[in-house]
Amino acid sequence: MTAEDNHRIAIITGTSSNLGINIAYRLLREVPSDYRLTIIVTSRTLPKAIESIESIKKYDETTTKRKGILEFDYLLIEFTNMVSIRAAVYELEKNYTKIDYLFINAAQGVYAGIDWIQATKENLTNPVKACTYPTYKIQKIGVKSKDGMGLVFQANVFGPYYLIESICQSLMSNSPDARIIWISSIMSKPSYLSFNDLQLLESDVSYEGSKRLVDLLHLSTFETLKTKYGIKQYVTQPGIFTSFSFFKFLNPFTFYGMLLLFYISRFLGSPWHNISGWNAANAPVFVCTKTDDDSRQDIKYGSATSHKGVEYLKNMEIDGTGKDDVLNYFQLLKKEWDDKLRDQIVDTRRAY
């Protein structure tokens, strides 16, 4: 076995989020300690990228204490900016010969607040449902990116898809065990997506609709990625956990009230209230490091936690209705952007 065989290179998008940073922590534990491991964190800003790197370094120094080489790089990428994605692809192709693991942890929302009256009604009548499938989060409608696409659609699905399509042949096919891990959601119900509004511009549940698109896009692409490039692709969902993105709408009282309801829901039998980012990262890291050629790729791997706080996996079947229509739309849109981005390359910076 060569030194290259013992080298794993992982890209974790959204590394600064609670889920993203815990994916990195768990990866330190699951990739053999004597392997060389390179973690490429992504962020929209340099300070956030460096902050994530320092957190992962500290975790290794205090907890995992890996024996092999642990190194870091950062990739400044904005999934709502196609030129930024193209520049990121250029950076990766310039600096690496392979990518082994790609975690798509995009979770952009366009939240405007909380309907507190509706939240109170739902939590009093059915607290488990209210904490699992809430309808009281208010989302803005019709928000577009500077590229003119639905912002949530581009950030959570099309932007990452464009990145995958851009590096699957040039970088990921060079790895003997390449894996793409999409982060979907427990809230990706078919009813949240209209095929007359695939960019989610008319939807008041654009976040949930984007995760339904993730499910369908995965189902329509995983077989081709495996047969054509040897890449294994999985879709996972992290359950319900504390997320930094919604903190601005909560004060200390409502935040701890939310945590209490999460624990009550878990006690009442909900498997999805993982609460901690560590437990939420279970399924994504499991499919990255512990599945084999016989593992199913047509299901959603879910992070779950028992009422005693013990983590486990709970897998879900996925309704594939409309997956071919979704793929056709994405392929056409990709071709449009290939033409628009032709010759647009930005030479940015070097490794951390």
Image: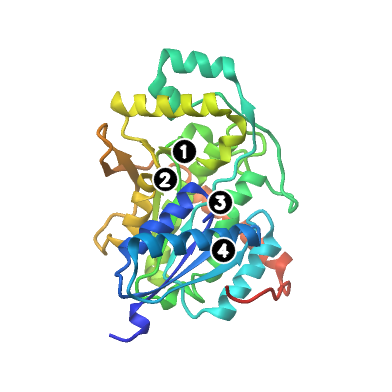
249 or 212: nearer the viewer? 249
The answer to whether the residues at label 2 and label 1 have Cβ atoms under 8 Å apart is: yes
Horizontal and vertical percent position of residue 333: 64, 56
Relative height, residue 270 to residue 220 (above, below): above
Q: Quadrant of residue 111?
A: top right
Q: Nearer the viewer, residue 55 or 209?
A: 55
Report the amino acid beneath label 1. Thr
- The residue pinned by badge 3 equals 157
Label 2 belongs to which residue? Answer: 277
Q: Residue at x 47, y 17 (%)?
A: 122
User: Of marks 4 and 3, which one's residue comes earlier in the chain?
Assistant: 3
**Number of other residues with Cα within 10 Å of mark 3, as a class: few under 14, some 14 to 19, many 20 or more:** many
Work out how far the residue at label 1 is from the one at label 3, CA to CA, in angstroms: 22 Å
User: Is residue 283 depicted above or below 63 in this figure?
Assistant: above
The residue that disc 1 covers is 242
Q: Mark 4 sits on what residue?
A: 163
Query: Mark 1 near mark 3, Cβ–Cβ under 8 Å?
Result: no
Indicate left or right for 100 with 77 as reference: left
- Residue reaching furthest front? 62
Q: Foreground: 2 or 223?
A: 2
Mark 1 Cα-neighbour bin, 10 Å: few <14, some 14–19, many ≥20: some
Q: Which label lies toward us, 2 or 3?
A: 2
Q: Secondary structure at mark 3?
A: helix
Residue type indicated by callout 4 = Leu
